[in-house]
Amino acid sequence: MNAMTGEAADYSAGVWEHFRAPRNAGVFPAGMAGILAGRAGSARHGREVEWMLRLDGAGRITACRYRVYGCPATIALCSRTSEMVRGMSPGEAAAYSVVGLAEELGLPAEKRAAALVVEDALRAALTGYNSKQSPPSAAMG
């Protein structure tokens, strides 16, 4: 792209960095037990996100993967969020503000709705996890 116009020009270098080289995109191997998963949004409505989180024996997120359909902002938010939540407990990850990340990345106001979908999918993956119980045994290795 030599000359960016309109919407593309509104994205920061950080958004383009994560859009062009997304981190942790993909899925865990089929049938892997003990993965927390959740999704939000709809491809029909322009953006859809599915998170998959793997916990260690201490209940920390050791790895995460995601599948995303959406604009560069949605993809960049997933990529950066995947880096940020690694090492967090489920409670810390549930409290993580993707909306705050959107502001940090300088997303235009009309693209900040993408943060809500990314955040909703992350929280959907964490729904039902009880921090007082051990993480699933298959996720411990």
Image (cartoon, rainbow, N blue to C red):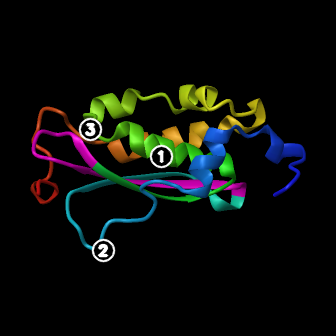
Tag 2 secondary structure: loop
User: Which disc number belongs to residue 87?
Assistant: 3
Going by the numbered disc 3, the residue's amino acid type is Gly
Percent of width and height locating residue 131: 18, 33
Q: Nearer the viewer, residue 106 or 120?
A: 106
Going by the numbered disc 2, the residue's amino acid type is Ala
**Eye-nearest disc, 2 or 3:** 3
Q: Earlier in the sequence, mark 1 or mark 2?
A: 2
Q: Earlier in the sequence, mark 2 or mark 3?
A: 2
Cα separation, mark 3 vs mark 1, equals 18 Å
Going by the numbered disc 1, the residue's amino acid type is Ala
Q: Give the residue furthest to the bottom.
A: 30
How packed mark 2 is, by other alpha carbons closer than 10 Å (few <14, some 14-19, many 20 or more), is: few
Cα separation, mark 2 vs mark 3, equals 23 Å
Q: Which residues are magenta?
A: 45-62
Q: Which residue lies under the disc numbered 2?
A: 30
Cα separation, mark 1 vs mark 2, equals 20 Å
Percent of width and height locating residue 79: 50, 48
The N terminus lies in which quarter of the figure?
Answer: bottom right
Q: Is residue 82 rendered to the left or right of residue 137? A: right
